[in-house]
Amino acid sequence: MVVFELNRKEYGIPVTSTKEVIKLTEVVSIPNAPSFIAGVINLRGNIICVIDLRKQFDFSVANTEETRIMVVRMQKMIIGLIVDRVREVLKINRSLIDPIPPILHAQIPHHCLVGIAKLDERIITLLNLEKILSMDQLKSLNQQSISKGNESHG
């Protein structure tokens, strides 16, 4: 799992879905884009849509020196996810993962959550990367990716 922070809490996504982690770079906003899309970046000649996970989960947004963009594969697309900080890559034994307690359903939609990992004194909320966005948001993201891709080839 790649462990990262949002709103001073730890979250994890599968390392197999993560392509790379980069420093926060200039994100170019897209006119009329849905609010969950921060904009696009040029990553070595590829235009990538970027989602601010902090906005997606209604957390406060404050960029620091540790703010990162995690470049991930989601729903057959390569996208960027803005997070407060990337901490580490951890191997988490399944025996250390508990189901989601009902209280957490109020903070993050439960369909996004896989489980809670307990590591000593740490609690890491494991996210289902494929379900972070709703179907409507995925359609919007796909449309933004297609339109940006067409512009870059035109």
Image (cartoon, rainbow, N blue to C red):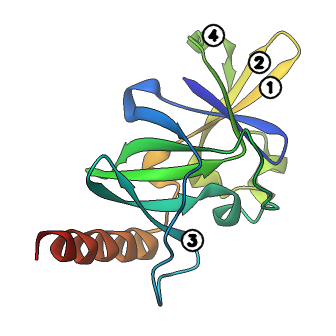
Q: Is residue 72 left or right of residue 123?
A: left
Is the Cβ of the residue at disc 2 closer than 8 Å to that at disc 1?
A: yes
* Comparing labels 2 and 4, the label whose residue is closer to the camera: 2
Q: Which residue is mark 1?
A: 123
| Residue 57 pos. (x, y %) | 70, 61
Q: Is residue 80 visible?
A: yes
Amino acid on which the number 1 mark rests in the picture: Ile
Is the Cβ of the residue at disc 2 closer than 8 Å to that at disc 4?
A: no
Q: Which residue is mark 4?
A: 95
Q: Is residue 99 visible?
A: no
| Label 3 vs 1, first from the N-terminus | 3
- Look at the numbered disc 3 and give the secondary structure of its residue: loop
Q: Which residue is mark 3?
A: 36
Amino acid on which the number 3 mark rests in the picture: Phe
Amino acid on which the number 2 mark rests in the picture: Lys
- Look at the numbered disc 2 and give the secondary structure of its residue: strand
Of 35 and 65, the residue lying toward us = 65
Q: CA distance from mark 3 to mark 1?
A: 26 Å
Q: CA distance from mark 1 to mark 4?
A: 14 Å
Q: Residue at x 33, y 75 (%)?
A: 144
Q: Residue at x 77, y 18 (%)?
A: 118
Q: Residue at x 84, y 49 (%)?
A: 103
| Label 2 vs 1, first from the N-terminus | 2
* Comparing labels 3 and 2, the label whose residue is closer to the camera: 3
Q: Is residue 13 left or right of residue 152?
A: right
* Comparing labels 1 and 4, the label whose residue is closer to the camera: 1
Quarter location, residue 107: bottom right
Q: Residue at x 68, y 13 (%)?
A: 96
